[in-house]
Amino acid sequence: MLSLLPKRVFWQAAAVAFVVIGGAGAGVMLSIGGVPLLLQATVPAVIATVLSALVIGMLARQVNVALAHHAEETRTHFERELARKTSELRSTLENMHQGVAMYDADYKLVTWNQRFREFLNMPDEFFSRDRSFIDYLRYIGARGEFGDQNIEAVVAQRVEQLKRVHSFERTRPDGTVLEIYRAPTPDGGFIAIYTDITARKQAEQELMRAMEAAEAANRVKSGFLANMSHELRTPLNAIIGYSQMLQEEAQDVGQADFVPDLTKIENAGKHLLGLINDILDLSKIEAGRMTVFIEEAKVSSVAAEVRGIIEPLAATNGNRLVIDCPDTVGTIETDVTKLKQSLLNLLSNASKFTKNGTIELAIARDGDRVVLRVSDTGIGMTADQMARLFQAFAQADASTTRKFGGTGLGLAITRHFARMLRGDVTVASEPGKGSVFTLVLPARQGEAPAQPMAAPRRAVSGDVTGERTILVVDDDEAVHDTIGGMLGREGYRVVHARNGRDALDIARKERPDAITLDVMMPQMDGWSVLTALKNEPALAEIPVIMLTMLHERAIALQLGAAGYITKPVDWAQLSAMLRRLGKRGDTASVLIIDDDPQMRETTRRMLERSGHTVAEATNGQEGLAWLAANPLPSVILLDLMMPVMDGFEFLERVRGNAAWRDVPVLVVTAKSLDAAEIETLRGVTQRIIDKGVSTGVDLRTAVRDILKSRAVTSKATTV
Amino acid sequence: MAKILLVEDNEMNRDMLSRRLERKGFEVVMAPDGQQGLELAASEAPDLILMDMSLPVLDGWEATRRVKAGDATRNIPVIALTAHAMVGDRDKALDAGCDDYDTKPVDFPRLLGKIEMLLQRGKE
């Protein structure tokens, strides 16, 4: 600061100091002189003092002027600086795509940009420094943006939120989706940032719809093919059958020279049947209809049976078949038909691609696994060909089909089978040096076998015991280490995904019992992953626990999360939550009683997507009739206003019947209930959902909650 | 000679199998659906029934169950024929009371073996 003072000011200040010190010195000398001297000295002293005062006054004025001048300069300097900064800030704010606003400690609006005004769509008088955030909330509340919720309650809740960093999404009446982020500032106010994410949301939704449509189409295709099996095989049976018959008859009537041609028809028919069977098997796998049947068999008997079928095939290309299966291999618990089919696939491939060579099946026991190795001395494969080998409809080479025939599905099916049986099949090969396929299967299945691919959840029986699998989804390696370690110690099997896309793949493959899902991940955030999981019928029932930095309980539950935990993770809380979620419950049967066909239809679809089975009745009377004729449903969804018999009477009848009394009832109604009605319903229903505001997720969550509580109850009674 | 009741809705399959069986010396009676099959089982008293499982009117599972529930027909051996070798089908067929099970397309020598074995067992 001193360096800023001009030299002139410094010297003037020095002069003032000199005079002051001089004047004071004179005064001191006078007082030493004592009273007699006082009078003598008075006049000069007064003069000196006056003079001093004058000089001081004069100089002080000069200093004042100088200082004022300096302050003026400094102020101008700061004002210029401030103006520059303000303008920089302003143009930054105005050029942002986001709407930005700052509020002070009284939640009064301090700064905002034009985008903010546009996003808020409020009358001009709200954009002034004397309006507060609370005024704004009340205004949009009055405008109806909080739905039926109590405006003051929402205001109180929103104000409470301001103490923490939080973010949420809001759809405005015109359909624009805003992501709103608010964070407290050090002065006690807060900053709000509004981002228009409409395009992103639309793209996400479109992607989701396209994905759903594609998956649905694929399921329809697979289902169609699986259903076609009878239609496709019947005419082939006739072709094969009649050609066999004609061969017998030709021989009987002495026309044996017809036999070779008839044999060709028969063989071609059988070949076609094999191809159709492959395609149908794969369709069945894809449609989730392939079931696993576990039985125990001697491995050597399986090998002997396979030899009987493959030996003639190997011989056609001049190959020698060697089967090495020591008795010590013992027995295997597996789906024997699928094991045989897998071995036949591998061995017939080997026979097809090998000429005048050796085909070997070597079987050995390796601890609790059985290793079945099929090797040949055939043409082998490049690394590139091997990479595509196990994919459906991708033979190693397009020309392979022409040369060697086959659908190219055999290996894809073999891999599916191996994985359904909790094993796998791998390949090692080099061009010209033959190939080795290794099929490894567990000798004992122990618990339930792995689920059929893409099978709906209901295929899982509720009482399957054994370790539970938790899928941990996080982009942060440290979280995998810590959560993985913790869950591992508690006896869970942990599988890991580092991003959303992997998470979905792994969830499909592993069918975990629960998922912990980080919200903040690059590319696909946790919310999108959650939405994708909940939109996929086979995955929708897996409970998901959101791990978030922020308090976003409402959005988590709305999107169907089973729970949420804020980071840093409290292990005890996570562990308790996982225990509480327990094993996945079975899916439920739901009876919908509603006179509105559209409501029934949408609810049915939504519930069926979660794997529930649904029955419908159009009024209370029909509902009672259905209950009398069918096993009890897990839940009843009940409309109140219906012709013939309304929901109130229905409830009264149901609760009055000892057999039906305990069926949970969810009232789904558009009727605005008065206090007496609510009181009536309170004792006899599990929950009341307002049709007007209910979303599918609400219903789904409500149904799931009820099933969960029932699962707990029934467990409690069996213990 | 043994009498076989063939219950099969597909005309060609019925024709083929019946002709082949007849050539082997069996007497064959035929029904195109489960209901008629059930009636013939009672009126014709066959020595053995070959039962297709996907049949109109009354399917093969139910027809077999009723054959096995009827006092007069209970002891007639039934061989289930299904279109595809599904493991579940075999269990289902045996659950329904079938004595044996084979898949279509029929491997005739194998089917003959099963027929003869069941007829033999019946005589003992």
Image: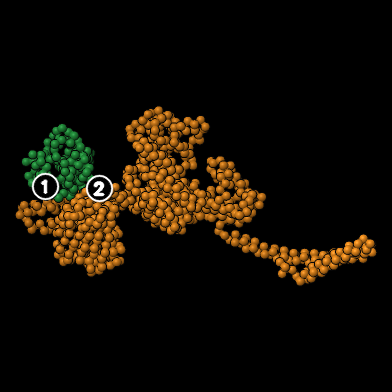
Residue B113 badge: 1
Q: Quadrant of residue A373?
A: bottom left
**Image height check: is A484 above or below A41?**
above
The residue at the point 22 percent across, 38 percent down is: B62
Secondary structure of the residue carrying numbered label 2: loop
Relative to B10, residue A75 above or below? below
For label 2, the crowd category at 10 Å Cα-Cα, with few meaning under 14, some 14 to 19 and many 20 or more, is: some
Which chain does the numbered disc 1 sit on? B
Q: Residue placed farthest to the top in the image?
A: A656
**Discs 2 and 1 carry the same chain letter:** no
Q: Is residue A49 left or right of residue A472?
A: right
Left or right position of A423 against A561: left
**Residue A617 picture location, percent across and down:** 38, 35
Expressed as whole percent of the image width and height from the top left, the position of residue A642 reads 43, 33
Chain coloured orange in this rendering: A
Residue at position x 20%, y 42% in the image: B93
Instruction: Please identify the quadrant where the C terminus of chain A is shown.
Output: top left
Circle 2: residue type: Phe
Say if mark 2 contacts mark 1, CB within 8 Å: no
Task: Using the numbered discs, state the Cα–Cα distance from disc 2 to disc 1 in whole angstroms.
Answer: 26 Å
Amino acid type of disc 1?
Answer: Gly
Tag 1's secondary structure? Answer: helix
Which residue, given by chain and number where applicable, does mark 2 sit on?
A: A293
Q: Residue furthest left?
A: A254
**Which numbered disc covers residue B39?**
none
Q: Is residue A513 visible?
A: yes
Q: Report the residue at 86% width, 64% height from top.
A: A28
- Of all chains, the one bearing label 2 is A
Q: Dot 1 surroundings within 10 Å: few (below 14), some, or many (20 or more)?
A: few
**Who is closer to the viewer here, A432 or A268?**
A432
Name chain B's colour. green
| Residue at the spot 13% in from the left edge and 57% down from the top edge | A263
